[in-house]
């Protein structure tokens, strides 16, 4: 029998993918894998525990041991949407190493929906090159047109991770994802100022490593014709001087989602 492998990120799309795979292929043929970045919001781990109780399937828990910020510091890199070593080291490399020990054939199920069609070809090529098949349960019929938050509440009686209700564009890495945009950083400044302060301090320390590092930042300013590095300190000071709705910033610098299919 083919082993059906689902990566569970503690977000809603991967949870719905897991639900669909279990319904179609059965618990006995499904393996659920979670790569722990160690900085997910506490409520994400609560959501994960409730999924475990619902599905009653053991999870494979993979953990490298460092956080995304520790990985970046060790690499002497200030990450951003274009370069983020945590994606590869904490997720992709961990997952690929685990896959090497798995029997074939197996099918890897990725929680891409219709907003991520542009990622499908590269993901299929990468994992098929390793001898695995790839499928996308959120693209199966019947299509799910409801918001995934409603699926979780109405169908499973499980409250979604609280970051969705807070307006975040995703529920990754406790509101301090190194790839998230300005809108989500403002949400963190409002909801978890201590987390924002820690990330701001980390970024400022990294910029002192060398003259080269002083020209890099987690964010970019794209308000003019020239794209420039934009620090969390600058974002906070701009917001404090003239508060802006995070929704107005999401389209300017939206999150680039990471994961095993990156």
Image (spheres, helix red, strand yellow):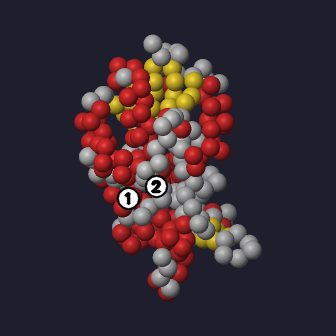
The residue under the point 48% across, 67% down is: 185
The answer to whether residue 164 is above or below residue 224 is above
Q: Which mark is residue 170?
A: 2
The residue under the point 37% across, 52% down is: 149
Residue 183, image x, y percentages = 50, 68
Is residue 75 at all visible to an observer of this figure? no
The residue under the point 47% across, 48% down is: 145
The total of numbered circles placed on residues is 2
Q: Quadrant of residue 113?
A: top right
Q: Quadrant of residue 80?
A: bottom right
Is residue 154 at all visible to an observer of this figure? yes
Residue 14, image x, y percentages = 44, 41
| 83 and 46: which is toward the camera | 46
SS of the residue under disc 1: helix
The answer to whether residue 191 is above or below residue 137 is below
The residue under the point 64% across, 71% down is: 221
Looking at the rendered image, the quarter that the C terminus falls into is top right
User: In this rendering, would 169 be left or right of 38?
Assistant: right
| Tag 1 near tag 2, CB within 8 Å | yes
Using a 10 Å C-alpha cutoff, classify the residue at mark 2 as few (fewer than 14 neighbours), some (14 to 19) or many (20 or more): many
């Amino acid at each position: 029998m083919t082993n059906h492998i689902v990566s569970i990120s503690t977000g809603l799309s991967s949870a719905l993918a897991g639900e669909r795979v279990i319904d179609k292929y059965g618990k006995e043929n499904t393996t659920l894998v979670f790569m722990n970045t160690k900085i997910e919001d506490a409520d994400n781990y609560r959501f994960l525990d409730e999924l475990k109780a619902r599905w009653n399937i053991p999870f494979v828990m993979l953990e490298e041991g460092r956080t995304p910020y520790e990985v970046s510091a060790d690499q002497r890199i200030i990450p951003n949407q274009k370069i983020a070593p945590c994606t590869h080291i904490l997720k992709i490399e961990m997952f690929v190493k685990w896959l090497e020990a798995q029997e074939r054939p197996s099918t890897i199920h990725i929680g891409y929906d219709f907003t991520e069609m542009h990622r499908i070809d590269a993901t299929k090529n990468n994992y098929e090159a390793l001898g695995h098949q790839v499928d996308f349960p959120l693209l199966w019929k019947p299509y799910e047109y409801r918001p995934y938050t409603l699926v979780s509440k109405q169908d499973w009686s499980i409250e979604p991770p609280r970051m969705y209700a807070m307006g975040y564009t995703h529920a990754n890495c406790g509101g301090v994802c190194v790839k998230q945009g300005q809108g989500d950083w403002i949400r963190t400044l409002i909801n978890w100022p201590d987390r924002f302060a820690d990330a701001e301090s980390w970024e400022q320390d990294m910029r002192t490593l060398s003259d080269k590092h002083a020209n890099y930042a987690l964010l970019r300013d794209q308000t003019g014709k020239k794209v420039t590095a934009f620090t969390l300190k600058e974002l906070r000071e701009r917001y404090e001087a003239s508060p802006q709705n995070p929704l107005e910033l999401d389209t300017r610098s939206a999150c680039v989602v990471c994961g095993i299919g990156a």
